[in-house]
Image: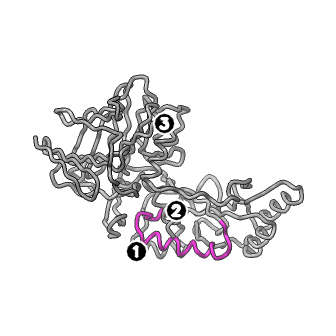
Amino acid sequence: MRRYLTVAFSFIVSCVYSYAQKTEIIYYTPDIVRVVKSPTDNPAEHHSMVVKAKPQTAGKKNVIVTKDSDGRLTFSDSKGNVLLREGDMSMKPNDSGADKGTWRLGQSFLLDADEPVYGIGMMQNGKMSQRGEHRRMIQTNLEDFSHFFQSIKGYGLYWDNYSPTQIDDNGKVLTLESEVGDVIDYYFMYGGSADGVISQMRWLSGKVPMLPLWTYGFHQSRERYKSSAELLSVVDTYRSTGVPLDGIIQDWQYWGSNYLWNAMEFGNEDFGNYRQMIDHVHNTGAHISISIWASFGPMTKPYRELNERGLLYDFSTWPQSGMGFWPPRKDYPSGVRVYDPYSKTARDIYWKNLSRLHKAGIDAWWMDSTDPDHLDFKESDLDQALPVTDPVTGKDVVRSFRSVRNAFPLASVEGVYDN
């Protein structure tokens, strides 16, 4: 077994080669360690869609990493107290389909039997601690996942992979296994407390600015307002009764029929005077937010532009029917399709069309269906391969939907934020 210790770019990288596997241990700060494991000696470089921070000068380490004879890592604090140990790992080649040439990657971690962990996302399980979970983590309308958890022991772990990921916890061992990747890539952080860990994750992923003061007030919404007159009557009622109102939210179908889904224009004739509506809301001292989606109807301008460039996914999404009533008439399919938010070109097209509402005076976006809605799910839907813009090089690489599936909410929201 060979061991190398390299100092470069003012941070510390130690490389361990064992069983034809390369392991890198990279200190981002004295408290944050990145671990990268590859099944080959010449791994593809993983450019994170989430982590924005760069490695800093390590200085005195507050997290100590040791390796046993089998290559398993142990993370301890500066006093030698063990925080977390690795268990077994797995690297299985994907030999066919859209992900051929990549790997199915897993790593287990040995937790104390009475050690609560928090995070992983929002699940309908009524639990705070997520010990004992067994599930495939994939974004849905009802459950949203984040490959991050933190322990009552004051550490956190971010698993930097965007494909559907299985979590299994048998009470002693917690295992994460992702369906697509080139390397195992995770970040261990020791903050000493929940706040400390959250602060470190914010440092890694980028600090989110505070929203304007008015967004923290009272906002009125309902399933939707069906006309500008209805919306204004609600605003005026709040004002006349002296009830404070900071904002009102216009939900869906202001664009018209389902064939015009998310047109990013007021195509509904009951909003024909939408500019006067927006001005009236502002004149009362309130703000207006509006619903936008990650999908488009076939008669919209964004759909046509995205479709010409091959930047639309092809799977069933909401709404399934072109008819605007329930239950849906599937013999009149809506033709609505989800766009590719991983592509910078698609993001720019999205914003170019959204800017019409911005110029009209809309104050904020209610970004709906950023999961996105995926109806009548089939595994083959995830095999679709569309362009993904590399966050570092800016070049487009064709990748399967499966390989980036769980990053859809981030990519969709980030595309609007960056513009």
Under circle 3, the secondary element is: loop
Question: What's the residue type where badge 1 is placed?
Answer: Arg
> Is residue 338 depicted above or below 273 in this figure?
above
Residue tagged 1: 309
Label whose residue precedes the other's in the sequence (3 or 1): 3
Which residue is the extreme one toward the left?
1
Q: Alpha-carbon distance for marks 2 and 3?
A: 37 Å
Q: Are marks 2 and 3 in contact (CB under 8 Å)?
A: no
Label whose residue precedes the other's in the sequence (2 or 3): 3
Mark 3, residues whose alpha carbon is within 10 Å: few (<14), some, or many (≥20)?
A: some
Mark 1, residues whose alpha carbon is within 10 Å: few (<14), some, or many (≥20)?
A: few
Q: Is residue 83 left or right of residue 202?
A: left
Q: Alpha-carbon distance for marks 3 and 1?
A: 48 Å
Residue tagged 3: 193
Residue tagged 2: 294
Q: Residue at x 47, y 51 (%)?
A: 202
Name the spot of residue 163 as percent of width and height, x first. Answer: 36, 50
Name the spot of residue 18 as percent of width and height, x first. Answer: 14, 41
Look at discs 3 and 1 and give the one toward the viewer. 3
Q: Are marks 3 and 1 in contact (CB under 8 Å)?
A: no
Question: What's the residue type where badge 3 is placed?
Answer: Ser
